[in-house]
Amino acid sequence: MVNTDLIGPMLCSKKAVEIMEKNGGGKILNTSSIRGWEHGGRSVVYAASKAGINSFTRTFAKMVAPLNIQVNAVAPGFVKTRNYDNMTKEQCDIFIDQTQLKRWVTEDEISDAFLFLTRNDAMTGQVIYVDAGFTLK
Ligand SMILES: NC(=O)c1ccc[n+]([C@@H]2O[C@H](COP(=O)([O-])OP(=O)(O)OC[C@H]3O[C@@H](n4cnc5c(N)ncnc54)[C@H](OP(=O)(O)O)[C@@H]3O)[C@@H](O)[C@H]2O)c1
């Protein structure tokens, strides 16, 4: 999990910078999670990986800013992908009840945030939470 969610993006970022530097700049987008915020759910390793990606996003953003490379992340809330296929409605309802808006976030709403970050040249080192109000608590 750490390899996929944290080390992988770090290695990809390193490679991307080599290419972006030659092209005069670029944008690196990471995928975080609401579980990387303050503390996670039941998976400590997942929470640590996502908190790590938040830290990496901010730290690497500073490092590559002189190369005109922006580094940001999107932190999704609950998005009903295949990860929830084996859960009962009652289990899913417990998740959704933790959001202020009492709803799932759609895949389109997540991709909208990523697309916004591709267009915005002023943002770097930010983690955007698209979470139906989960982190409001
Ligand atoms: N769904 C949520 O509620 C939610 C909430 C917060 C954050 N996120 C984050 O959003 C991202 C996508 O989640 P998802 O719900 O869309 O999950 P998903 O449907 O299970 O998709 C995960 C994707 O990652 C790929 N993958 C998994 N292990 C890999 C590996 N070792 N090397 C390369 N690719 C690998 C999978 O490839 P294959 O298709 O080939 O298996 C799949 O395309 C994840 O980073 C997750 O932590 C999701």
Image: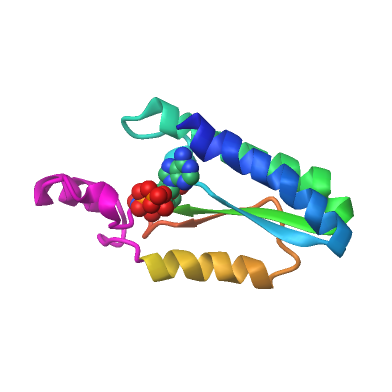
120 up-or-down from 93: above or below: below
Position of residue 1 measured from the top left corner of the image (x, y, whole percent): 45, 32
For residue 2, above or below residue 104: above
Q: Give how far across and how far down residue 136 sits, in percent.
A: 41, 51
The prevailing secondary structure element of the residues shown in magenta is loop
> Outermost residue, top direction?
44
Q: Is residue 59 left or right of residue 89?
A: right
Residue at figure coordinates x 38%, y 57% from the top left: 133
Say whether residue 23 is visible: yes
Q: Residue at x 28, y 57 (%)?
A: 80
Q: Residue at x 80, y 58 (%)?
A: 20
Residue 70 higher or lower than 118, as above or below = above
Asked whether residue 115 is drawn in magenta, I would say no
Whether residue 136 is visible here, answered yes or no, is: no
For the rendered model, the colour scheme is: rainbow
Please indicate whether residue 88 sits to the left or right of residue 23 in the image: left
How many numbered discs? 0
Q: Residue 10: name its quadrant.
A: top right
| Residue 98 covered by magenta stretch | yes
- The residue that appears at 69% across and 70% down in the rendered structure is 120
| Residue 9, position as x, y percentages in the image | 60, 43
Q: Which segment did they paint magenta?
A: 77-106
The quadrant in which residue 106 appears is: bottom left
Q: Pinpoint residue 92: horizontal percent, then vertical percent.
A: 18, 49
- Nearest to the observer: residue 39 or residue 120: 120
Q: In front: 25, or 51? A: 25
Question: Relative to 8, is 31 above or below?
Answer: below
